[in-house]
């Protein structure tokens, strides 16, 4: 998933998929990880930055079972339940991301002026909801970009004060 941030807008080209909330989310993530700088890693896997090509590293695998996350979507309503391997000891957060697929942006300023960039799995709608019991009923997130040709959804749970995903599900979204 790609959370496009708005802090590059000052370069003269506004990213049509960016949202100020995603920059705040990135700052919170860095704060939770005690990172000294905010940056955009190639990937975050199991809650940690990962870049392919660093000494030809394979993507890390957790291999642990943390429970089962089930979701159902009916029209614009989503219900979810998370059953952890061990009993609940703290609140958990449900994250819902609507992803825009097959997006193209035309770069109007900066070092790539005049070029086009193709994007997949761009977060165009996002919301979080806390729960004490691992059950949720909510509407899908509002989209801040509505012109994607195709959409997908990613849903994951994490502990309230720890952004590391416990379990995730996703798939194509038919709207």
Image (cartoon, grey):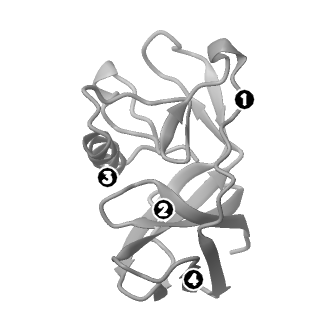
Image coords of residue 165 (percent x, y): 51, 58
Disc 1 from disc 3: Cα separation: 31 Å
Which callout, 1 or 2, points at the residue further toward the start of the chain?
1
Disc 3 from disc 4: Cα separation: 29 Å
Residue 121 or residue 145, whichever sits in front: 121
Q: Which mark, residue 58?
A: 1
Residue in the image at 29% along x and 32% along y = 35
Residue 11 is left or right of residue 105, and the answer is left
User: Which of the two discs, 1 and 2, sits closer to the camera?
Assistant: 1
User: Which of the two discs, 1 and 3, sits closer to the camera?
Assistant: 1
Which callout, 3 or 2, points at the residue further toward the start of the chain?
3
Q: Secondary structure at mark 1?
A: loop
* Dots 3, 2 in contact, CB < 8 A: no
Q: Residue 147: tell me if it is visible.
A: no
Q: Is residue 80 above or below residue 27?
A: below
Give the crowd class for mark 1: few <14, some 14-19, many >=20 residues within 10 Å. few
Q: Which mark, residue 21?
A: 3
Number of marks: 4
Residue 159 is left or right of residue 101, and the answer is left
Disc 2 from disc 4: Cα separation: 25 Å
Q: Which residue is mark 4?
A: 83
Disc 4 from disc 1: Cα separation: 29 Å
Q: Residue 58: tell me if it is visible.
A: yes
Which callout, 4 or 1, points at the residue further toward the start of the chain?
1
Residue 175 or residue 85, whichever sits in front: 85
Q: Is residue 49 above or below residue 102?
A: above
Which callout, 1 or 3, points at the residue further toward the start of the chain?
3
Residue in the image at 33% along x and 67% along y = 160
Residue 100 is left or right of residue 94, and the answer is right
Image coords of residue 120 (percent x, y): 67, 43
Q: Secondary structure at mark 4?
A: strand
């Amino acid at each position: 998933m790609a959370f496009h941030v708005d802090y590059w807008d000052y370069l003269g080209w506004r990213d049509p998929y960016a949202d100020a909330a995603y920059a705040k989310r990135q700052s919170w993530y860095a704060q939770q990880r005690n990172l000294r700088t905010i940056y955009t890693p190639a990937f975050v896997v199991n809650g940690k930055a990962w870049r392919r090509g660093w000494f030809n590293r394979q993507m890390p695998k957790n291999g642990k079972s943390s429970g089962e996350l089930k979701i159902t979507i009916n029209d614009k309503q989503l219900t979810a339940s998370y059953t952890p391997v061990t009993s609940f000891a703290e609140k958990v957060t449900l994250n819902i991301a609507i992803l825009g697929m097959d997006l193209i942006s035309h770069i109007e300023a900066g070092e790539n002026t005049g070029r086009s960039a193709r994007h997949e799995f761009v977060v165009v709608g996002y919301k979080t909801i806390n729960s004490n019991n691992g059950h949720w009923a909510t509407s899908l997130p509002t989209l801040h970009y509505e012109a994607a040709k195709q959409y997908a959804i990613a849903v994951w749970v994490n502990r309230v004060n720890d952004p590391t995903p416990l379990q995730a599900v996703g798939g194509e979204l038919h709207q």
